[in-house]
Image (cartoon, coloured by chain):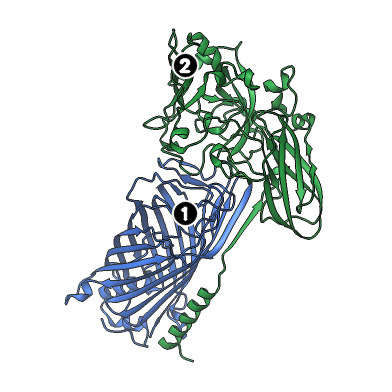
Amino acid sequence: MPFSRRLFIQGAGGAALGLSLVRCETQTITSKGSGGAFSFLTPVDRDSTSDVIAQRQPGTFFTQRSGLTALSIQFENIPIKTASSWSLEITGEVSNPLTVDLANLQARTNDTVTILKTIRCIIDAPTLVPGLVGTALWTGVPLRVLLEEAGIDMQTTRRLRFFGYDSAEGVTQNLTLQEVMDAGSLGRLEPILAWGMNEGDIPHAHGGPVRLIVPGEYGYKQMKWLERIEASTSDEVFGTYQEVVGFFDDGTVQVVSKLTNPLAAEPVPAGLFTIFGFALSGSAPVARVQVSLDEGDFVDAELLSEAEVLAEDPLLMDALQFQAPGMSYPFPDVWAPFRLEVDLAPGAHTLRVKAVDANGDIQPDTDTDALDGANSDFRVSFEAI
Amino acid sequence: MGSVSALGYKRLVLLLRPRIAALLWAALVFLQATPSLAFNSSAWTRPKGQLWTLLSVGFVSAGDQFDQASNRRLFNDAVDGQAFQDESFYAQVEYGLIDELTLHLELPYKRIFVEQASVNTAIEAPGNLYAGARVNLLKLLPIETRITWSLELGFSIPTGYTRNLNPSVGPGNVEFDVKTAVGYGFQIIQGLPAYTQLGMGIRARSTAYTFSGSADCPSANEINCQLDNQPNFSDEFLFLAEFGITPFKGSVLLFGKTLGNVSLLEPELGFSAANPIPTRQRIVKLGAGTILYPLRFFDVPYAKNVGLVAQYYSTVWGQNAPATDDIFLGLEYSHAF
């Protein structure tokens, strides 16, 4: 049959009709098995200049930035300050306004501490989101020390206001006087001005050379790219994320758990299978993690022991939590890995996971309010084959 | 120039003067195998009754991205290697309705793979359907010239895919193109025809999301999806500069080109490594390619108009875009009805 114009039009029309009738969109998600294969603690930052860090496996669950632009913060436009060009002013209700540079901070060896903290983004979803939660060792000086040196007026100061150089207007944040000067009364470690991350410098992407680390609180309270701190007489909430986005001013990390294996849409082998995940609470250690398979009864998962964690990551010995008397693993504000072996018959399954912290706070069944940190129980559907 | 008869293109060309032959060869072989993201028009129109088709597969990958300040950095901070890969199929058809007017259709079957810190995600589905019509403006005038100047109007519409999956096969909105190009056919030396063309255009990126679907995504940062925020993308300026030669009596085409997209607004809208659809982007690509017509001079029905296409592009500059290296391999066929 000759290739005629009619034949072509008929063929093209048929092909177009066929395409319109076939809905062939296919999405697949495959776990890289990071839950079991990678250390859960101190994931490596690839920008770190530390030789010790550089030799270790690339870590997961640690972001330098979100892929999406938040507010007016343009990561790419943030001035890069170095050890010689960075300085911080402490002003306001102080008798001795201070300007400190990095060398000044690092010279305070007697006050220097290293803490372990899991930073979790407040908008991190109940399901696992790579990059919005991660843990690192942070080294620095308690902010309290500098405020005392500046002669902070404890009678008139209500809040500490923080100003960044990360946008034209400057991103802002605040903490109450109690959060900074009396963190122990809240059952937390003190906020620090950190210059070290995982035993290296803090990369620019992580807020370096110096950033604020506030134990027990969500990521939006961990100010990056600091340039000024003001002791303010005002008790009004002050902060870009609170005022523009509407996040709660109380940034306490709520109890949460997540599975890293299995993940949604990822088939797993039938038979005995070890599920893996982590749990976190900002205000108390994780006490229990419970798992329900196929809507059955909740059973306790096994929290990894301190020995297992340390064996996995010797750097952790540098953390204050592992040295301070009275502190024992698992720690508040540090994720606690857990596992549970389940027997999976071939077919479709669901898993629900909920954590309970030492204060008795339980991960709720539902929580749709992301503005105070969504933490409804973790649910995943998957297939065993 | 009249319609192309069944005697075949080669015979017709041999009957014509060399300078016109050069122009015709150029008209025959201009390329559009780059996805419709780029400038996808030409200064030339097809002769009346000529059908041109190109089926190709692309191997587009990026381990880096150009951020909003045009700094080259890892595509995904937590991933080594080629975190973004696009191995899509493209079907492109043009038809010369009359000498002065060419119809143009493109449909990609997109296959996109993204490696994240702890998961690999993939999507495949038909992407945006592009339809356009190109008018040869100078052919409308009673003059004979080596210069050709065309204007193409086109639009692209989603084919029902889900726009807020991670990744998605396209942005999900309807877009309208106005493109114009000027071309010039000449001989570098006797027997070595060449052509060059310059093109520019505007892509209006509408907020019409009618032709794509959305997944019910509970938050902004799920593994498999993102909130369906239907962004207002910036319109884009498109450009093309191309030069090619056709040695060996037209049995080979060699060309080099640069093309790009420039968002009219500063690329402040985020670029997501999980779903790397173009938002507000600025890119410049440099590339080269060839088409071989191995059976050009054999009297085999249909087969002599089959061309083997290979192209390579590198994204040499960008803002808010993957720093891709692009390879396209294809099979071209033209037929005169």
Residue B158 x %, y %: 45, 65
Residue A88 found in image quarter: top left
Numbered badge on residue A101: 2
Element marked by disc 2: strand
Three-letter amino acid code of the residue under disc 2: Asp
Residue B201 found in image quarter: bottom left
**In 3D space, how far apart are the residues under numbered discs 1 and 2 (Cα atoms)?**
42 Å
Q: Can residue A96 be seen in the rendering of this structure?
A: yes
In screen coordinates, is B248 left or right of A107?
A: left
Residue under the point 76% across and 45% down: A291
Q: Residue furthest left?
A: B142
Residue under the point 52% across and 61% down: B162
Q: Which chain does the numbered disc 2 sit on? A: A
In screen coordinates, is A348 left or right of B157?
A: right
Q: Can residue B32 be seen in the rendering of this structure?
A: no
A67 or A163, which is in the foreground?
A163
A125 or B175, which is in the foreground?
A125
Q: Which chain does the numbered disc 1 sit on? A: B
What hue represents chain B? blue
Numbered badge on residue B277: 1
Residue A145 x %, y %: 55, 12
What hue represents chain A? green
Three-letter amino acid code of the residue under disc 1: Ile
Residue A92 x %, y %: 42, 15
